[in-house]
């Protein structure tokens, strides 16, 4: 019996003969791989170009600020510096802001006229209410007093000028020119 077992091949050899090696994967793609890479590169390049063009597109222009907005911003800016600016200099700054506002908003030649000339022009015809005329006249007279009569103004006078200018600009909701 022992010869019988000797003549038979071992079991492991039979099992190995029955099992076949794994076949390599088959390429079922009808499109060559280099064409896939080229197409991917082109698609990504186009996508990048579109993103770049979108990012660089011209932005819509902002509408210009209205003279009232500009004047209020300038008045608020100098209001923060009211304690550090000398009252004489402050009166000039506030007067310039208000005169520029009236010139730009109402097309009146305030920046090229003296206060007296401007007030005489307003007396004849004016886009302002009586209250606003009175406020503007008071403001211009105070500024002239500080600027030309060398009135010794204080920061309280500066605050009063600022309040009058703010009231005039905020209250001037008339028909725009």
Image (tube, helix red, strand yellow):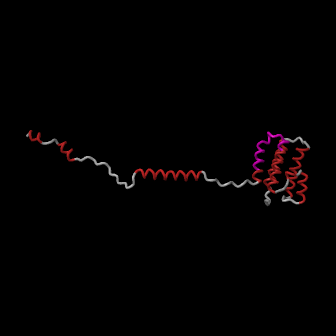
Left or right position of 158 against 57: right
Q: Nearer the viewer, residue 107 or 25?
A: 25
Main secondary structure along the magenta-highlighted residues:
helix
Quarter of the C terminus within the rendering: bottom right
Q: Nearer the viewer, residue 47 or 174?
A: 47
Is 86 one of the magenta-colored residues? yes
Q: Residue at x 81, y 40 (%)?
A: 85
In the image, residue 32 lies at what x, y percent?
39, 52
Quarter of the N terminus within the rendering: top left
In the image, residue 66 lies at what x, y percent?
75, 54
Left or right position of 118 against 4: right
Position above or below: 100 against 2: below
Q: Residue at x 63, y 53 (%)?
A: 58
In the image, residue 133 lies at what x, y percent?
86, 56
Residue range highlighted in magenta: 72-90
Examine the image and state in which quarter residue 130 appears.
Answer: bottom right
Is 70 one of the magenta-colored residues? no
In the image, residue 152 lies at what x, y percent?
89, 40
Position above or below: 63 against 159: below
Position above or below: 15 against 118: above
């Amino acid at each position: 019996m022992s010869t019988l077992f000797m003549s038979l091949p071992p079991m492991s050899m039979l099992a190995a003969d029955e099992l076949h090696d794994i076949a390599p994967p088959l390429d079922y793609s009808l499109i060559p791989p280099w064409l896939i890479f080229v197409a991917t590169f082109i698609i990504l390049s186009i996508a990048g170009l579109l993103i770049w063009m979108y990012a660089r597109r011209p932005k819509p222009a902002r509408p210009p600020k209205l003279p009232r907005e500009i004047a209020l911003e300038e008045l608020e800016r100098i209001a923060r510096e009211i304690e550090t600016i000398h009252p004489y200099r402050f009166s000039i700054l506030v007067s310039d802001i208000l005169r520029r506002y009236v010139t730009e908003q109402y097309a009146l030649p305030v920046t090229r006229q003296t206060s007296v000339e401007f007030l005489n022009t307003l007396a004849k015809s004016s886009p302002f209410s009586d209250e606003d005329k009175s406020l503007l006249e008071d403001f211009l007279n105070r500024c002239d007093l500080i600027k030309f009569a060398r009135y010794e103004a204080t920061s309280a006078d500066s605050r009063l000028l600022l309040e009058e200018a703010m009231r005039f600009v905020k209250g001037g909701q008339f028909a725009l020119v």
